[in-house]
Image: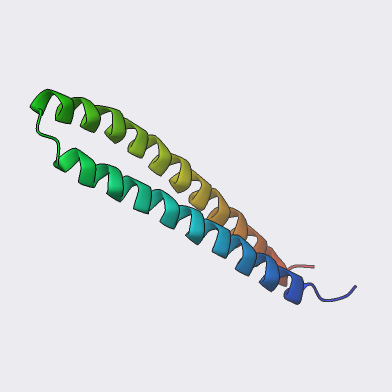
Amino acid sequence: CSSTEANELVMSVIVGTVVIVSSLIILISYALILFNILHMSSAEGWFKAIGTCGSHIIIVGLFYEFGLITHVKLSSDWYMGQGKL
């Protein structure tokens, strides 16, 4: 069998780039939303916006967290099995 190290490296770089770029877009988006919320004059609107955006931020964070945990777990399982024949 041929070595797959080059393919794995390329795939890791591509996946890493996609994750970093999408995370940056989301973080910048939330920073702009937070900036706009902090500049609201109405207390009622402020609390409503925090409630809506806060729950959404939690869900998105959990989604990325579980994806990261799954990826790290699968990667470590794969790595641990490399020495076995």
Q: Is residue 75 left or right of residue 45?
A: right
* Place of residue 17 in the rendered image (x, y in percent of width and height, measured from the top left): 56, 64
Q: Is residue 33 left or right of residue 75?
A: left
Q: Nearer the viewer, residue 6 or 1?
A: 6
The residue located at (75%, 70%) in the rendering is: 7
Q: Is residue 80 visible?
A: no
Q: Is residue 7 left or right of residue 74?
A: right
The residue located at (22%, 42%) in the rendering is: 36
Q: To which quarter of the image does residue 84 belong?
A: bottom right
* Place of residue 38 in the rendered image (x, y in percent of width and height, measured from the top left): 15, 42
- The quadrant the C terminus occupies is bottom right
How many numbered markers are drawn?
Answer: 0
- The quadrant the N terminus occupies is bottom right
Q: Is residue 60 above or below residue 72?
A: above
Q: Is residue 70 above or below residue 47?
A: below
Q: Is residue 84 visible?
A: yes
Q: Nearer the viewer, residue 53 or 81?
A: 53
Residue at the farthest right position: 1
Report the coloring of the rendering. rainbow
* Place of residue 73 in the rendered image (x, y in percent of width and height, measured from the top left): 55, 54
Q: Nearer the viewer, residue 37 or 13?
A: 37
* Place of residue 79 in the rendered image (x, y in percent of width and height, measured from the top left): 64, 66
Q: Nearer the viewer, residue 54 or 74?
A: 54
Q: Is residue 67 above or below residue 79?
A: above
Q: Is residue 31 left or right of residue 10?
A: left
Q: Is residue 16 above or below residue 56?
A: below
